[in-house]
Amino acid sequence: MGNILIIDDDAEVRETLLSLTRRMRHAGEAVGSIAAGLARLRQGGVDVAFLDVSLPDGNGLDALAEIKALPDSPEVIILTGRGDADGAELAIQGGVWDYLLKPSPIKETMLALERALKYRDGKRGACGPVALVMEDVVGRSRAMRACYDAVAGAAGAASSVLITGETGTGKELFARTIHLNSARAAKPFVVVDCAALTETLVESTLFGHRKGAFTGADSDRTGLVKLADGGTLFLDEVGEMPLNLQKAFLRVLQERRFRPVGASQEVESDFRLMAATNRDLDAMVEQGGFRSDLLYRIKTIPICLPPLRERPEDIKPLCVFRVGQLCEQYNLPLKGFDQDLFHVLEGYGWPGNVRELFNVLERAVVASGSARTLYSMHLPQDVRIKVAKASLRRPASSGNGSGNGPGNGAPPEARPDAPAVQHSAAPAPPVASCCDSWPELIQALHETLKSCKDVVERRYLEVLLKRTGGDVQKAVEASGLSRSHLYALLKKWGLSVDGPGVGTADPV
């Protein structure tokens, strides 16, 4: 007997589905909102959830990620009152079992429920908890946990794996992790850098050659494909593989046989194929840059690694892990971290992802010398400048700020859904339009903190006067300064006001 949860705001639909589940001898519960549904799912014990798309407190599809991240998450059957191809795509990408259009025939609904329960029972019987060997793999975000599940599934299979993701996300590391957790762990893991294959030596490199096969072939050479016999052959940057080689390699994948250069007979190699790329292979197929039949061969199990900017909660554990490694490597005492350093790192976009983060941390460790704590000042200047500029471009909102450093929050291009950093009660001047033409600030960022503060203070006053039309009373209210303090600052920077209620002398 299964436990079914119906999340739908239509009372008639809830009653119909509850009646159906009881008729099928299953236990059923029903709620009318996403909040109530999530609260019940967090308690556990639900096997299948019927989830409506349009609910009073939001779109059911938006809750999919949270539902699938729950321990022992249920199978989800989406209900919708209107056909939506994009919604169906999002639902399937989110891992739902089925997508039903209301009103759905009773027989179709029962069949979907029966199959979902049968699939869940089989999954429970075949897939207990798996203890993975995760050397050097760090991350606790929801996106990374989904990747770990994919690694566990791939490790238990023998099919080809295609790992995609931006540069520096750790594609080779994940390929090695799958290999270490597979039945081939004791055999070789052989890497082929497709971007480094040269037209003249590509066949010799991959398939090997016999002595005398060409000028310079002074002895037999075993190719990389044969070296991977019994183990894993990893094609790094497979999107860079030349088209003429793609055809030859397709036959090797089909037959697991090839002929070394200069040999008269074919040899065999029993390898498992894994590949990685930061390119869109589907788009390359459409443009004629990659063979579709080869893509089908290498994409049996796809795994997509998330960029670092989409999982900022992983930055701190990555820092602790990498700095620990560096301190051991350089024979240094273990270093601690100032909190502002994390603010800056989380505010950076990380176009180079984890690889770039590790490089930045190594530069910071070297810059810190014998200091026992890493501060944001130890970070490279180019990183700090980009975070500061992104922070200044971000529109301000009312309320109290979360910190004084330039790295509080992520840049808009890195985390577009993040809330804007909040400042003091006074609305900040619209710096987004003038930041790029503000060379004084860029220069000051290379100098002392006082120089930077002076530049910002003068520009703030100039924009404040312009915005308030020179009205001192309005300027006082907007800035939160006392009248005497405002006059002192204006006098300091040689600024004059011509609005109503403005005097020429300091009124102290």
Image: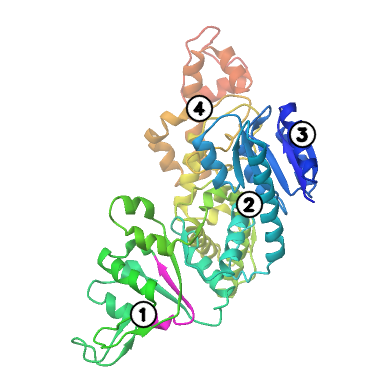
Lower position in the chain sequence, tag 4 or tag 1: 1
Q: Nearer the viewer, residue 213 or 122?
A: 122
Label at residue 441: none
Q: For the residue marked with disc 4, what is the amino acid? A: Tyr
The quadrant of the picture occupied by the C terminus is: top right
Does residue 178 show up? yes
Lower position in the chain sequence, tag 2 or tag 3: 3
Q: Where is residue 345 in the image (x, y as percent from the top left)?
A: 55, 51
Q: For the residue marked with disc 1, what is the amino acid? A: Arg
Lower position in the chain sequence, tag 2 or tag 1: 2
Tell me which residue sits at (26%, 72%) in the image: 198
Distance of label 2 from label 1 (alpha carbons) = 41 Å
> Which of the 4 image quarters holds residue 215?
bottom left
Q: Which of 296 and 33 is in front in this view?
A: 296
Front: mark 2 or 1 = 1
Can you name the residue that lies furthest to the top here? 500
Q: Residues within 10 Å of mark 3 (few under 14, many from 20)?
A: some
Q: Nearer the viewer, residue 139 or 84?
A: 84
Does residue 280 show up? no
- Which residue carries the number 3 mark? 31
Label at residue 257: 1
Q: Is mark 3 on a helix, strand or loop?
A: strand
Q: Which of 361 and 288 is in front in this view?
A: 288
Lower position in the chain sequence, tag 1 or tag 3: 3
Label at residue 460: 4
Queried whether the magenta region covers residue 228, the answer comes back as yes
Q: For the residue marked with disc 3, what is the amino acid? A: Val
Lower position in the chain sequence, tag 2 or tag 4: 2
Can you name the residue that lies furthest to the left here? 215
Residue segment shown in magenta = 225-236
